[in-house]
Amino acid sequence: MPVLIDTADTGAPEDFGALSRSGHGVPRLRILLTPYRSLTPDGFVWFIGLTASLICLPLLAVIGTSLFWGLLPFILGTVAAIWAALKRSWRDRAVYEELVLWDDLIRLERVEPRRPPRDWEANPYWVRVNLHARGGPVPNYVTLSGGSREVELGAFLTPGERVALKARLERELRAS
């Protein structure tokens, strides 16, 4: 599931990593947003195995000939290229956003591969959650505005998940 919301009557756990803040106590809410990954590690193995088997099927007709050795490098290169493309896709989708809400601080951190982490902080009293039904890069584009800038939130989520996220954030911000 791409949206993990961690909250309880006593607050979210304090041992969740880089966003731990010593002066703010236990956070009220922690939301971890990750993109959906449809290909599991087991599915990857099955896909590569099946693809390699099907691509090598035409080689059965030319086993023992010089044509076999001429085609083999291209078939192995094709399987290797598919493998590399899927691995690169996995690394590129290793992005996540972590939003943590305390009574006096809201903090958003976005971690992407091959980039330094980006973070944003503001006072929750002044933060507004905006839903841009049109005009954003994706449908139902969610932004947080407060502090000195406006930041996007969960652009990799589905439109329905972004609407639900907006409603949850507004409810939690009103409660503070």
Image (cartoon, helix red, strand yellow):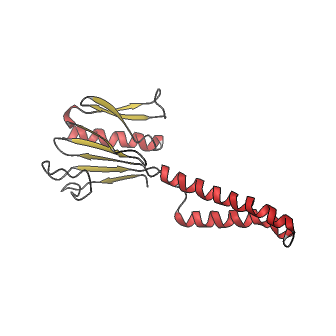
Percent of width and height locating residue 119: 30, 41
The residue depicted at 21 percent of the width and 57 percent of the height is 14
Considering only vertical position in the picture, is 106 above or below 150? Answer: below
168 left or right, relative to 24: right
Quarter occupied by residue 1: bottom left
Quarter occupied by residue 48: bottom right
Considering only vertical position in the picture, is 50 above or below 1? Answer: below
Percent of width and height locating residue 64: 85, 73
Percent of width and height locating residue 176: 18, 40
Q: Residue furthest bottom?
A: 64
Quarter occupied by residue 120: top left
The residue depicted at 54 percent of the width and 53 percent of the height is 88
Return the residue nearer the eye: 51 or 167.
Answer: 51
81 left or right, relative to 124: right
Q: Residue furthest top?
A: 135
The residue depicted at 46 percent of the width and 43 percent of the height is 156
41 left or right, relative to 130: right
Percent of width and height locating residue 94: 44, 52
